[in-house]
Image (cartoon, grey):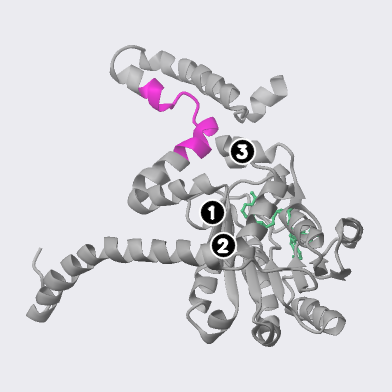
Amino acid sequence: MVNLLPPMHWITDLVVVPIGLIALPLVATGSAVCRTVSWMFTRRVKPRGKAIVITGASSGIGEHIAYEYAKAGGKLILAARRVDNLNAVADACREKGAMEVEVVAADVAKEDDCQKIIQTAVDKYGGVDILVNNAGVLQSFEFEQLKDLKAARQLMDIDFFGNVWPTYYAIPHLTKSRGQVIVNSSMAAFLPHPRQAFYNAAKAALFKFYDDLRTEPFGRSVAITIATPGVISSELTEGKFVNETGECVWDEGRPEVHFGPMLSSRIKTEVAAKGIVAGASKRQRYVVVPAYFNIFALYRFFAPGATDNVLHRIMYRSERPGKSLTGRLACKLGLRSSAGSSEAGEGEETAAAAAEGTVPETSGEEKKEA
Ligand SMILES: NC(=O)c1ccc[n+]([C@@H]2O[C@H](COP(=O)([O-])OP(=O)(O)OC[C@H]3O[C@@H](n4cnc5c(N)ncnc54)[C@H](OP(=O)(O)O)[C@@H]3O)[C@@H](O)[C@H]2O)c1
């Protein structure tokens, strides 16, 4: 290929790239040492008596983050749409030792409601010390299934703007208290996962948004912790999701199809909440729960094509009976006839799925017969 760039670019390419590569291990090592030293000497944030706002506190991770801060004696504002659930969580928080608890019925997709959440904290406790942006909903449909963009807009409104608006209205209060923002993004921000492209895009946008805020004056005075959980037990992984018409629905059979074998990696909600609060209390920039999910992000970075292919195969395996890798390899090697491969492959799929605790989807006809 002919390089049409002026000669100066050749020179800079030849100089900057090798120098950058040589400097990289030194900078990375230095940065790791600084992080470790700062982690060792950073005193834990003490939540006792602090005004802590938690969105999406009516269930799952948000509920358990509320319990962690309640045990530490925080003054809590719990926000979500289901008030009955919030009241039950508030009672449990009082029992666990929260100094004060206030419940706010709010839909984070509405900017006014987000302003109301922060205003309640200011009216009740005089400000905001810690803001936990946790509310979110999962998507489970493919892009081409959309008849219009209602569902797409709703997911971005809840999963991205529903996180940004509370932070916006809390700016003066967080800067005054030199407080903290905890953001619940997701490992899905890095890893490809079918049927949740809008959810993943919103989570990736959150990651980038808060990462960039760290370089602005706001991020110099307010500590930002971005949590990227893997697969955690909660309503979100038990069958609650937004479908292609934009409705939030329950389907208990859906997680097995949606998450495939990854469902077996689900960890307890309280473990995830403890990890996030512990990391945030040390003002960590990132918290990955469970930590081993870091390795998948590395694979995504160094082998994006392979990661896409593996994820596609895993997630659509049940819809491609008889097309397993081992089945096709056996046909190619002549160990199995291609005519019989479909049947044999199907057996293999079922056995593999049974071993992993997942149930392959059956066709409508098969279901009727059963
Ligand atoms: N579970 C996982 O595997 C996983 C992994 C990575 C990241 N996350 C993230 O963790 C966060 C919490 O999810 P979860 O797993 O704990 O699921 P969950 O049990 O379904 O909790 C979601 C929370 O968000 C609230 N919420 C949803 N839509 C809302 C809206 N429009 N306005 C106000 N609140 C709303 C829900 O309350 P109401 O319905 O009462 O409003 C609920 O309290 C989400 O942001 C999710 O994306 C979860």
Name the image quarter holding residue 155.
Answer: bottom right
Q: Residue at x 57, y 22 (%)?
A: 355
Where is residue 30 shown, x and y percent of the image? 35, 65
Relative to residue 351, is residue 218 depicted above or below? below
Going from N to C along the chain, the mark reached first, 1 or 3, is 1
Label 2 belongs to which residue? Answer: 203
Q: Quadrant of residue 64?
A: bottom right
The numbered disc on residue 188 is 1
Say whether residue 285 is visible: no
Q: Nearer the viewer, residue 328 or 266?
A: 266
* Amino acid at circle 1: Ala
Q: Which secondary structure lies at badge 3?
A: helix
User: Can you say which quadrant of the picture contains the N terminus?
Assistant: bottom left
Identified at 56% across, 68% down, the residue is 42
Q: Are marks 1 and 2 in contact (CB under 8 Å)?
A: yes
Please name whichever residue, 210 or 291, is drawn nearer the observer in this view of the structure.
291
Location of ligand 1 given as a quarter of the image = bottom right
Res. 241 visible in picture: yes
The local crowd at label 2, few if under 14, some if 14 to 19, many if 20 or more residues have their Cα within 10 Å, is many
Q: Secondary structure at mark 1?
A: helix
- Residue range (magenta): 312-328
Question: Where is residue 113 shown, x and y percent of the image?
Answer: 79, 76
SS class, disc 2: helix
**What secondary structure do most residues of the magenta stretch adopt?**
helix
Q: Which residue is mark 3?
A: 263
Give me the residue at 45% from left, 37% from top: 313
Point out the tag, 1 or 2, that comes first from the N-terminus: 1
| Front-lying residue, 177 or 2 | 177
